Image: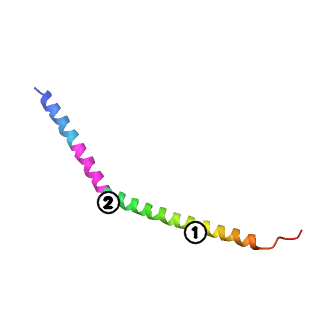
Amino acid sequence: MIWPWIAGGAALLGLILIVGSVLRVAKLMPRLRHAQLKLEARRGSVERLRSRVEDLQSQLTELQRKLPAKPE
């Protein structure tokens, strides 16, 4: 009978596809981890920059408040 051969071939093909996919994902993992670390570093620098901008805005507000009012 040929059906066991067809079923066995289909199972083997499925196994090969699964193993190939797992290997491909394992190969990509280091690059994905590097990209994730890079993104976290950029987020950290954005947060530091945002807090610096807020500090400068508050300093500007303080300085503007200290200036005398313009006569109109």
Query: Pointer 1: residues within 10 angstroms few (<14), some, or many (20+)?
Result: few
What is the quadrant of the N terminus in the image?
top left
Which of the two discs, 1 and 2, sits closer to the camera?
A: 1
Q: Nearer the viewer, residue 47 or 13?
A: 47
| For residue 3, side relative to residue 29 (left or right) | left
For the residues labelled 1 and 2, say whether their Cβ atoms are less than 8 Å apart: no
SS for dot 2: helix
| For residue 38, side relative to residue 59 (left or right) | left
According to the picture, the residue beneath numbered tag 2 turns out to be 30
SS for dot 1: helix
User: What's the residue at 52%, 67% (across, down)?
Assistant: 48
According to the picture, the residue beneath numbered tag 1 turns out to be 52
The answer to which quarter of the image holds residue 2 is top left
User: What's the residue at 63%, 70% (across, down)?
Assistant: 56
Picture coordinates of residue 54 (x, y %)?
A: 61, 65
The answer to which quarter of the image holds residue 53 is bottom right
Residues shaded magenta: 16-28
Q: Nearer the viewer, residue 37 or 7?
A: 37
Residue that sits furthest to the top in the current view: 1
Picture coordinates of residue 34 (x, y %)?
A: 37, 62
Picture coordinates of residue 63 (x, y %)?
A: 71, 73
Whichever of callouts 1 and 2 sits on the residue coming sooner in the sequence is: 2
Circle 1: residue type = Arg
User: What's the residue at 55%, 67% (across, down)?
Assistant: 49
- Magenta stretch contains residue 5: no
Main SS, magenta region, reads helix
